[in-house]
Each structure stands twice: as C-alpha cells, then as structure tokens.
Image (cartoon, rainbow, N blue to C red):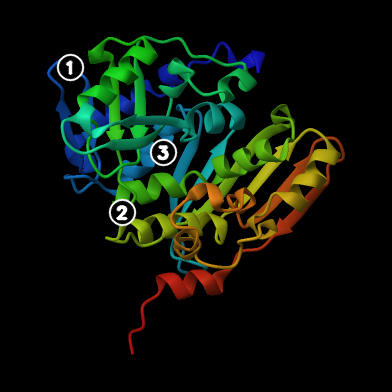
Amino acid sequence: MTSSQSISVNASSERLVARLVDDAFKYGVDVTKTSNGTVIVDAGVNAKGSAEAGLLIARICMGGLGRVTRRVAFDAAPLWPTWFEVHTSHPVLACLGSQYAGWSLSATKEQTGGKKFFSLGSGPARALAGKETLFDELGYRDRHDRGALVMEVDRLPPQVVIDKVLADCGLAPDKLVIAVTPTHSIAGTVQVVARVVEVALHKTHVLGVALDEIVEGSGSAPLPPPSPDAIQAMGRTNDAILYGGRVHLTVKSDAAAKRLAKELPSSNARDYGRPFAEIFASFNYDFYQIDAALFAPAEIWISSLESGATYHGGAIDRALLDAQWLGDVS
C-alpha cells in the first residue's frame, strides 16, 4: 500500500467532521466539549440523531474516501423501500484502514468511578494510533494533527478512555472529535449498514486473498427499522448485510475473482440461515463462537481486470428479512 502513504484519512475527512459539528441542529446531534476541549458528538445516546447524521458519520468512518448515499425505491416490488449505497475507489484504505471497528477501548469500573466501559473504535483516528496488527499488514500509518473516532456504544466515553485515545493518537485534546452512535439509534443503524463493503473487505482478508488485488468496491444494503432492544437492533443491522447486502468488487486477477465469488458470500457459513440475534443468543452472546464465515454480504459480484469476466455468488434472503422486519397488520 505504498501509494496510500501520501493520503491522510484524517485530513480527508476533516471537512465532513466540521460539517457534523457545525450543523449539529440540522443533523439532530448534541455537541459538547470536555474540560480540556475534546469534542463529543452524541448522535443517539441522549440526542435524537438522524439518518442524515448516520450517513455523514459513515463517510467520516471511511476517512472521506467513500461515497454513501440513500436511495428510496417503491417500484417493482423492491426488497425494502430504503437502501444505502456505498462506493469507494480506495477500498482497502477506506474500509480496513479507517472504517473497520477494530480498536478495542475499555475501562474498568474502578477507572470510571462507576460502570465499566467497552467500545470498538472505528474511523480515521485508528490510523493515527496504529494499535492493531492490521496496520502492520496494510503498511499504513496516518500523520495528522487532528483526528476523528466513532464509538458504537450506548453511553458517552469516560475521560479515562478519551485520555487513552489522545495519548495513543498523539493529539492535543482540542484536536480530537469523538462521535457516539448506539446501535439502537437511527444514526447508529445507518452507519453500521453502510459497512456493507467493509464487511466484504474484511472477509477477503480473513480468506487470505491479497488485499492489493482489490481495485474498486461498491455495495448496497437495506435500512432496517431500529429496535429499542440493543440485541435486536444489533441483530437487524447484521441481518441487513448478511441476508440483504450486495457487493460488487473489481479485482486484478481471474483467480482471485473466481475464489471470492465462491467463498465470500455469507451462505458459506455454518450458522447461516437464522436471524443474527437468534444465532448470537445461541452462543451465549459470544461473538467469537460464531462462525467467522458468516460475517459477509449475502450476494457478491466480482469482476476481473485480467479476463474481463464477472463472477457471481450468493443470494439475498428476502423471506428471512420480511419475517424479522415486517409487522402483522391483521
């Protein structure tokens, strides 16, 4: 990824972050500052948030290197009326170098003075800290004097966690923005569903296919209704991708295209076929017991630059999504 060294995901997303903070009312978010100046954007803990906030936060998560749009379709009996579409010409850097929720941030109840805290950090500030081994594989570290981090958690981060982020990123307190998007919120639902291409990139990495094979990435997934129950909300966002997500990747070689079309779809997983919340509960709410092959889009198209052929695999499961998301009006 030597060509990526000149790109700063934090600099590329800086204007998007400023828009979220400066237009807080428009996006339905609450903006506060800690005593030393770190900006906290509440997009669903106490604030109402909005789908537009989730869309903008999704773009921030991609380090400003992706396009995320909302499409409403009521014609031709669509799978679902509202969809989010994602595209990036820098798929590895945007999705794995920025968007992927890979930075574990936690604090004990003794450290917080109350309740223990845990969140996986995503977004461009990850590349400043470089705490994950993934960055060694990518050969990428960002250098910038400002950073933005997104936390998918149902409460605002304690100061001890903020201090850790600042120290690991090498940032002055007033140069960091943290956006908080609970899964059960509207913004949280949107920004998770907008990870449909990132999920495909991560599965590609898990399969051991060289990441430099991937040239372009596009995808779409339906926007499920949020749920007040945290487990159900998390299940719905996962189902949107595992059973309703569609991704089109362009890769360099025919061999990679054929393999990904066959092995990448979520239907290859042992646990495929049940709602994610049900699967999660069956493993005592332990993510690590779930077959990792499940975390992938439902349907895949892979185009090869070498041959010009496109290979297809997987399929959406409309029946499963309808059963989970549609209410009975009778």
Mark 2 and mark 3 residues within 8 Å of each other at the beta carbon: no
Side of 172 where 79 appears, left or right: right
Q: Which residue lies furthest to the left in this view?
A: 35
Q: Identify the residue position indicated by label 1 in the image.
A: 37
**Mark pair 1, 3: CA separation:** 24 Å
In the image, what residue type sits under mark 3? Ala
Question: Which amino acid, by three-letter code, is at mark 1?
Answer: Gly
* Residue highlighted by disc 3: 58
| 261 left or right, relative to 11 | right
Quadrant in the rendering for residue 155: top left
Callout 2, which amino acid?
His
Nearer to me, 228 or 9: 228
| Residue 279: % across, % down | 51, 62
Residue 200 in the image, given as x and y percentages of width and height: 61, 44
Residue at image mark 2: 184
Residue 22 seen anywhere in this rendered image of the structure: no
Mark 2 falls on what kind of element? loop
Question: Residue drawn at (49%, 28%), measured in percent from left and top?
Answer: 98
